[in-house]
Image: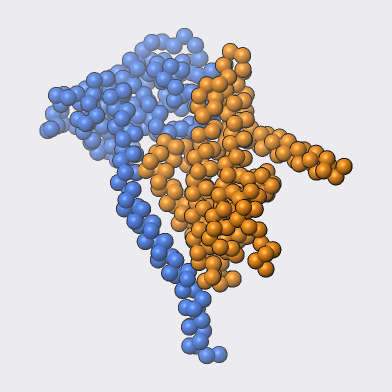
Chain colours: A orange, B blue
Amino acid sequence: MASSEPTALERLVNGILPENPIYRQLLGMCPVLAVTAGMRPAMTMAAATAAVLISANIMISLIRGLLKPHLRILVFTLTIATFVTIADRFLAAFMYQMSKQLGPYVPLIIVNCLIISRCEICASKQGLRIAIADAVGMSLGFTLALASIATVRELLGAGTWFGLPVLAESWWPRWGIMVLPPGAFLALGLLLATAQWFTQRRTANSHK
Amino acid sequence: MNQTPTRGNYLTQAWLVILLALLYGGALAAVQMGLGERIQKNKQNETYDQIPQLVPGADKAKTVEHEIQGQNHKHAIVYEARNQQGTRLGWVLPGSGQGFADRIELLIGLDPPLATILGLYVLDQKETPGLGNYITSAEKFRDQFSGKQTDPPLAVVKMDPDPKHEIQAITGATISSTSVSQIVNHTIENLRQPILDLPATAQH
């Protein structure tokens, strides 16, 4: 059985592109839509999610031998909620303005299916090393996806990147809609379609 | 059915959940004990850091908090701004109300008799980005409050504002602009008399 499970390296690589949590699995759409108006909130969210995902995967992998099948989801949720609350308090203590800006979306990491799915698929079945590799890979994939959407939205909508001016207002009229909620759906939809188009073209080429 | 095995069963099944709940609860309590004070301080600092900008010349370390009852019978905390020698320079009043999208929270700086506005700061708002959220911008909106008289109340106009009583609305954000001016008017109206009734020379 152990031979059929992916190795640490496979888990790590899979998370980044082949099984990217956003572009391939469409998980965690709530933060994707809500916090990608700018790079700063998006990257803070990515870091908080990564911290929770890695901690939860480590914890679940360590206690995986003790889990009862029908109580496992309860244990996952309990573990995730604890780490999310810790992350939320740390943000409020050390990045107060950012914590105010992200508002309810930090506590909402608890219900990000990305984390519970990694606990279920990987950490509750495989050892510590593989669970960490898996969490790191998925976190990188999540960060990459958030960064791509936030870059498009912040550049087109506000002409800045990480709050630094990039496009001068004189020759780039602001697309205000991109930093508003509809812009999140537009950017996500177009980027998803682009990702899908590349994947299909690559598959078609490899079959020739 | 026998009682004892069932009871034992529950424990053998749930001991991990109970143990983890206790463990996590302890961890959260420790985090709160470690960081709680710092978080509280962050919230307070946000207000205190603005006091020197809202009342020019004020020293934030000399600020005195007064708890008063407004004319709407609700308790409010107002900040008495003082200079380094402890002389009263003015007041900072917190005010809030409904904006276009969500609640707007303001800090209003006023001179000692509450006749002239000295400054305005937006603590929290969720107005439309690119339009209504310009209420936070000093150049585009907030600066024009400085020097305005509080009696009669402020009015909002679209162009050519009167320098003493009128505020020029942000283009495309008339509701947000009006909301801010209304919150300023209501806050001053509500708290003016209780503040003027405070003892003239508080000890320091």
Image quarter in which the C terminus of chain B is found: top left
- Residue beneath the point at 40% across and 46% down: A90
Image quarter in which the N terminus of chain B is found: bottom right
- Residue beneath the point at 44% across and 70% down: B18
Q: Is residue A145 left or right of residue B9?
A: right
Q: A118 or A33, which lies in front? A: A118
Residue sitting farthest toward the bottom: B2
Image location of residue B15, percent across then percent down: 46, 74
Image location of residue A151, percent across then percent down: 59, 31
Residue B65 to residue A134: above or below: above
Q: B148 or B155, which lies in front? A: B148
Total labels: the figure holds 0
Image location of residue A139, percent across then percent down: 56, 47
- Residue beneath the point at 56% across and 63% down: A127
Residue B149 in sight: yes
- Residue beneath the point at 58% across and 29% down: A154
Residue sitting farthest toward the right: A208
Residue A153 to residue B8: above or below: above
Residue B155 in sight: no
The answer to which quarter of the image holds residue A38 is top right
The answer to which quarter of the image holds residue B149 is top left
Q: Is residue A138 left or right of residue B192?
A: right
Q: Is residue A106 left or right of residue B37?
A: right
Image location of residue A194, percent across then percent down: 73, 36
Q: B13 or A143, which lies in front? A: A143
